[in-house]
Amino acid sequence: MKKNIKKIIFCWLFFFSWSIYSQAGSVDNLLKDLPEGIKSKYEKFLSFETNDARMHLSEFSSDELEQIKNAYEGLLNKSGKSEKRILWIVEEAEARKADKIAADRLFYVALAVIILMVLFTGFVVYIYLSQKKLFNQL
Amino acid sequence: MLTRHKDKLFFALASFVLIGSIALAYMVFMWVPSDMFQGIAQRIFYYHVPTAWVSFLGFFLTFLFSILYLKKRDLTYDRRGLVFASLGWVFTTGVMITGPLWAKPIWGDYWNWSDQRLISFFVLWLMYAGYLIFRAGIVEPHKRARFSSVLGIIAFLDVPLVYFAIRIWKTPSHPQAVFAGSKGSGLYDPKMKIAFFFALFLFHAIFFLMAWITARHYLIKQKLAEKESAHEG
């Protein structure tokens, strides 16, 4: 019985440390898959404090972000499928949020342009009609 | 001969404004990249800033013709001052509309009473509204021109205050000015610069086209007033 408990604890410790090791190693694996230019940028990004890191996301171009994402997805292909599904869920949630924000902003831009054009055209039409009226009085 | 030449110029300007407006809409909605931080909302910038710029030009010309009137006492200068003050006010109204429409998705509110750029601009809008209302209340032409000229000069003093408000009070909420060497104006992409300077050029054309139409209107109005006063006399 005691031997069995020892075996169980050993097995648990082995799998626990292996999973920790594989998680820690995923960053190194990701670095291996990235092109040189992005690798240094990515390493710099990892070095930032958690609170500041999000602010530095804008330093990546859209193309670089796509390449990092693809490399990470490639890594996830090797591990269990649940991580990849979580990534899809995060991607979908972010895409829907971005769509809503973009639609809202587009509405305000279109409204601003339309109102401005109506204002200028309205002014010109008002002047033209008043002018016509004045011409008749002359 | 001169009238025909003027008509051709007028139609050329009007055609450019029409085609240019379509081209600008294409550039703004389809061609320029979205801003990294503000996304699509930043595209209002291509209409908002040139409108503000041109309104300043209108007030500067009013200021210039006000000085000329006070110096030469010629009602032509007063009439020209009125043309540019009216247009300046219309363009300022445009700025007052497009600004809050940019602010709503970015700040979450249409207006920020603690932003000195906004307050000084609102004061500018009120002053020229006052200028136009004030004029309507005085019948005697030279008396009206004299008071309007003084008001046109005083009101213009707010224009540099509006422009430099960002630097004087260091308002963090308002984007930085495009000219006079400030960083963070948002024009970091060459396409953004092309679209912006095209918009600036187009808005000058719109301004002068509207000035042409308005000048003719006030000229007829003045002639009618002269005819009426001669008739009464």
Image (cartoon, coloured by chain):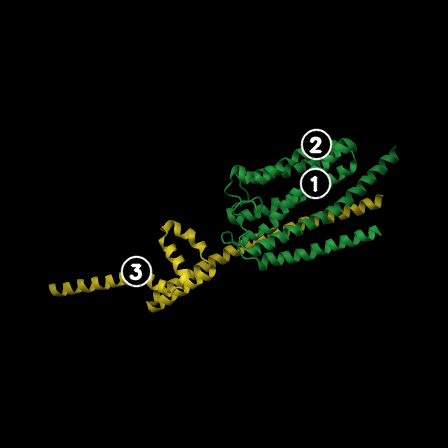
Chain colours: A yellow, B green
In this rendering, the answer to whether B19 lies above or below B135 is below
**Going by the picture, which residue comes out furthest to the left?**
A2
Q: Position of B148 compared to A56: left or right?
A: right
Q: Which amino acid does label 2 sit on?
A: Val
Between marks 2 and 1 in the image, the one whose residue lies nearer the viewer: 1
Gap between marks 3 and 2 measured at Cα: 74 Å
- Which chain is disc 2 placed on? B
Q: Is mark 2 on a helix, strand or loop?
A: helix
Question: Percent x, y for residue B45?
Answer: 58, 50
Q: What residue type is labelled 1?
A: Leu
Disc sitting over residue A137 in the figure: none
Residue under label 3: A24
Question: Percent x, y for residue B196?
Answer: 60, 52
For the point 75% across and 40% down, the residue is: B80
- Dot 2, how many residues are within 10 Å of its Cα: few (below 14), some (14-19), or many (20+)? some
Q: Is mark 3 on a helix, strand or loop?
A: helix
Residue under label 2: B150
Q: What residue type is labelled 3?
A: Ala
- Dot 3, how many residues are within 10 Å of its Cα: few (below 14), some (14-19), or many (20+)? few
* Marks 3 and 2 belong to one chain: no
Do the residues under discs 3 and 2 have CB atoms within 8 angstroms? no
Question: Percent x, y for residue B66?
Answer: 72, 35
Picture quarter containing residue B123? top right
Gap between marks 2 and 1 measured at Cα: 14 Å
- Which chain is disc 3 placed on? A
- For the C terminus of chain B, give its image quadrant: top right
Residue B144 visible? The answer is no
Q: Position of A69 compared to B62: left or right?
A: left
In this rendering, the answer to whether B154 lies above or below B25 is above
Total numbered circles: 3
Gap between marks 1 and 3 measured at Cα: 68 Å
Residue under label 1: B61
